Image: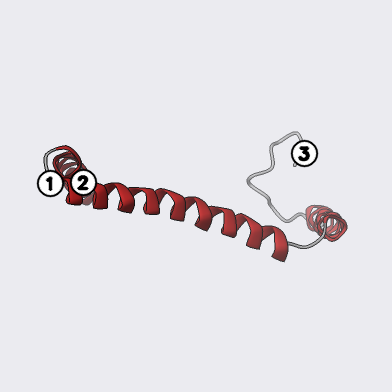
Amino acid sequence: MDKDRVAGGILLSLALSMGVLYTYLLFLAPDPVSILVLKLTALGVVGSFLIIMGWIGFALLTSPPHKRVLEIERRLAEEFKKLKERGYPFPWVDAGGGG
């Protein structure tokens, strides 16, 4: 059995067992435990949302301005054209010469 199948089996069994445990804690455990499980679930969902929102904000804050991106693209296109003229092989470019 290869590593991917072993990892898949472990992940599947872990997901199923955690789902059963979560269901038990949510519906069959005493009320204080169920409330704690709900609070932790809400914390995880809201925390994940805030982390993703912060990541997007950080990416927008630290990315170069649009004019700078266009300038970089123009320079890369010029370099690409020069290399093609020198005969450098680009296997990802189709036979028609598109890029």
Q: Which residue is mark 3?
A: 97
Q: Position of residue 9 (x, y in %)?
A: 17, 43
Q: CA distance from mark 2 to mark 3?
A: 63 Å
Going by the numbered disc 3, the residue's amino acid type is Gly
Q: Is residue 60 above or below residue 37?
A: below
Q: CA distance from mark 3 to mark 1?
A: 69 Å
Of the two numbered discs 2 and 3 in the rendering, the one whose residue sits closer to the viewer: 2
Along the viewing direction, whichever of 36 and 90 lies nearer the viewer: 36
Residue 30, labelled with which disc? 1
Sort mark 2 into few (<14), some (14-19) or many (20+) by Cα contacts within 10 Å: some
Sort mark 3 into few (<14), some (14-19) or many (20+) by Cα contacts within 10 Å: few
Circles 3, 1 touching at the beta carbon (< 8 Å): no
Determine whether, in the image, residue 62 is placed left or right of residue 20.
Answer: right
Q: CA distance from mark 1 to mark 2?
A: 6 Å
Q: Position of residue 17 (x, y in %)?
A: 14, 43
Identify the coloring.
secondary structure
Residue drawn where x is 65% and y is 58% of the image: 57
* Residue extending farthest top: 96
Going by the numbered disc 1, the residue's amino acid type is Pro
* Residue extending farthest front: 31
Q: Earlier in the sequence, mark 3 or mark 1?
A: 1
Q: Position of residue 66 (x, y in %)?
A: 83, 55
Residue 34, labelled with which disc? 2
**Is residue 27 at least partly visible in the picture?**
yes
Circles 1, 2 touching at the beta carbon (< 8 Å): yes
* Residue extending farthest bottom: 62
